[in-house]
Amino acid sequence: MTKGDGVNHIVIHSAADCSGCTACAGVCTHSAIRMEPDRLGFLYPKVDESQCVDCGMCVKVCAFHPEYDTSLNLATPVVYGGRHKDMREVMKSRSGAAFVAISDYVLNHGGVVYGAGFADHFRVVHKRATNKAERDELRGSKYVQSDLTGIFSEVKTDLQNGRQVLFTGTPCQTAGLNAFVGKKLRANLLLADVVCHGAPAPNVWRDYLEYVEKKEHEPVTGVNFRDKELFGWDEHRETFTFGDKRAGTERKKSYAIQYYSNILTRQSCSNCYFANTNRPSDITLADFWGIERVKPDANKDNKGVSLVLCNTEKGRELFDSVKAEMSIFPVLSNGYMQLNLRQPTDAHPHRNEFEEYYARYGFVRAMRHYHFMGFRLAFTRWMIRQKSRAYRFRQGLRIK
């Protein structure tokens, strides 16, 4: 995002310059900016020149740049691995249920939790939770960029009303919210980001669901992006539940293959400024990939372990308050450095071509053309498997 020639409002010269966090639209008091989807469903700001007064607030609030605010950060993060002591919580979470322990603490003290959930027909959006039942929808991986429309203003209202708020999201989302609320309201805001591989396209996820339902002749009634109960923590397979409770669960992996090919991700993801250990949040949460080389016995049951980076003093104090709920161990810097804590994910070499093809020919034809459906899928699976093996070797993971 930059200033335009002779104006003082946002101008997106390249899609890679915007993460879609919505801070610019939320900060505009003249309603001159609205977020509009592109062909893949990614949201970008559009300025209504007739309403804009060139106040420059939208430019000022943008945090998607190398100088994002880290003024509260510790010199180096304090890092732990661990999992919740209640295995029921671990099995309902994607890793070690650190998010559950932290969000339980906030809710038990009258706070509010924001995170990615579902609206409409499994459209991924950020939602507000004031109790544990609502919070439970926010746990677990959702490999789609969430819609934040109106959420930053909701968070700000909660903070102005004296509520403690835990906001969880990708680092570009937490950086945007941090800039949006300002330093005066930051005291009651707890930011938790995730180590992010990339944000996939909302429209592709929508079309994939429609494709699955047509194939099965039944509506999807449940989604699990990574089914740990059926396949274990280190296997990345989605499952769907169809129809009523009596319906079974179909085992799938094709969406995971699309996701890990990096062909669905937002263009800004390969330009991410936050893929390092100087995070824009109080706490960073992740799957502890590489746990085998740090604590070999910690994940023998393949149920998952959380990685927790305490980036600020506030984050360290928060995690100190929930340690009793978890079995934890400290981790040195050479034990937790995952790929996306070092660098952004490289985009697929045909990512832009895919977008053009998808917009012209639609989901099914694009998936077949790029080897995500049909007879070519077997070869694509083999290629992804080889890349996964190489990735796990670099991470120090075991290879099955």
Image (spheres, rainbow, N blue to C red):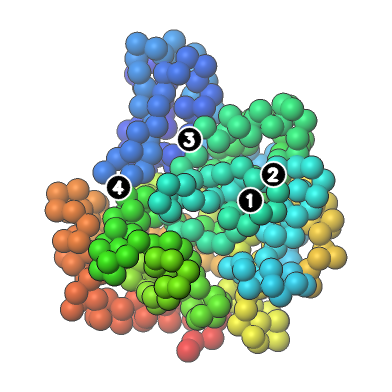
- For label 1, the crowd category at 10 Å Cα-Cα, with few meaning under 14, some 14 to 19 and many 20 or more, is some
Disc 4 to disc 3, C-alpha distance: 17 Å
* Picture coordinates of residue 3, whole percent (x, y): 41, 23
Image quadrant where residue 376 sits: bottom left
**Of labels 4 and 3, the one closer to you:** 3
Disc 2 to disc 3, C-alpha distance: 19 Å
- For label 3, the crowd category at 10 Å Cα-Cα, with few meaning under 14, some 14 to 19 and many 20 or more, is some
Vertical placement of residue 247 versus 301, above or below = above
- For label 2, the crowd category at 10 Å Cα-Cα, with few meaning under 14, some 14 to 19 and many 20 or more, is some
Q: Is disc 1 placed on a helix, strand or loop?
A: helix
Q: Earlier in the sequence, mark 2 or mark 3?
A: 2
Q: Is disc 2 placed on a helix, strand or loop?
A: loop
The reply to whether the C-beta atoms of the residues labelled 4 and 3 are less than 8 Å apart is: no
Disc 4 to disc 1, C-alpha distance: 29 Å
Give the residue type at disc 4. Leu
Q: Residue at x 54, y 75 (%)?
A: 228
Q: Residue at x 19, y 74 (%)?
A: 374
Give the residue type at disc 1. Glu
Q: Which residue is mark 4?
A: 40
Q: Is residue 260 visible?
A: no
Give the residue type at disc 3. Thr
Q: Which residue is mark 1?
A: 134
Q: Nearer the viewer, residue 23 or 14?
A: 23
Q: Residue at x 78, y 68 (%)?
A: 326
The reply to whether the C-beta atoms of the residues labelled 3 and 1 are less than 8 Å apart is: no
Q: Is residue 247 visible?
A: yes
Q: Residue at x 53, y 55 (%)?
A: 275
Q: Is disc 4 placed on a helix, strand or loop?
A: loop
Give the residue type at disc 2. Thr
Q: Quadrant of the N terminus?
A: top left
Disc 3 to disc 1, C-alpha distance: 19 Å
Q: Which residue is mark 3?
A: 149
